[in-house]
Image: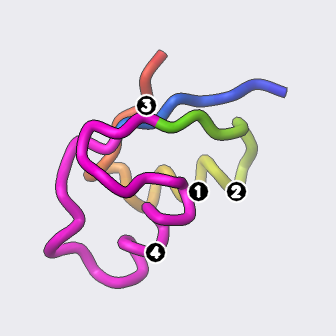
Amino acid sequence: MATIKIKQIKSRVNAPKDQKRTLIALGLHKISQVVEVEDNPSMRGMISKVHHLVTVID
């Protein structure tokens, strides 16, 4: 299956708890950390929830 690379670009310090938990579920713990996740609707939903904190890398 296809994968997506996600990079955290902003801090989660002032983010609500649900967004902090979403970043942890995506595997992101630090700024500039890059993770590779499966490309499925649930991951796309999590990415859209924290779209202001992450970027998708090609």
Question: Quadrant location of the N terminus?
Answer: top right
Proximity of marks 3 and 2: CB atoms separated by less than 8 Å: no
Proximity of marks 4 and 1: CB atoms separated by less than 8 Å: no
Is 16 one of the magenta-colored residues? yes
Question: Disc 3 marks which residue?
Answer: 56
| Secondary element type, mark 2 | helix
Residue 13: quarter of image:
bottom left
Question: Disc 4 marks which residue?
Answer: 21
Which numbered marker is on residue 45?
1
Proximity of marks 2 and 1: CB atoms separated by less than 8 Å: yes
* Distance CA(mark 3)–CA(mark 4): 19 Å
| Secondary element type, mark 4 | helix
* Distance CA(mark 4)–CA(mark 2): 14 Å
Estimate how packed mark 1 is, as few (under 14), some (14 to 19) or many (20 or more) residues with alpha carbons within 10 Å.
Answer: few
Question: Disc 2 marks which residue?
Answer: 42
Q: In the rendered view, would you say 8 is above or below 45?
A: above
* x and y percentages locating residue 5 in the rendered image: 52, 29
Residue 17: quarter of image:
bottom left
Nearest to viewer (mark 1 / mark 3): 3
The structure residue drawn at horizontal position 43% and vertical position 23%, both measured from the top left corner, is 57
Choose the circle earlier in sequence order: 4 or 2.
Answer: 4
Q: Left of 38 or right of it: where is 54?
A: left
Three-letter amino acid code of the residue under disc 4: Arg
Q: Which residues are magenta?
A: 8-34
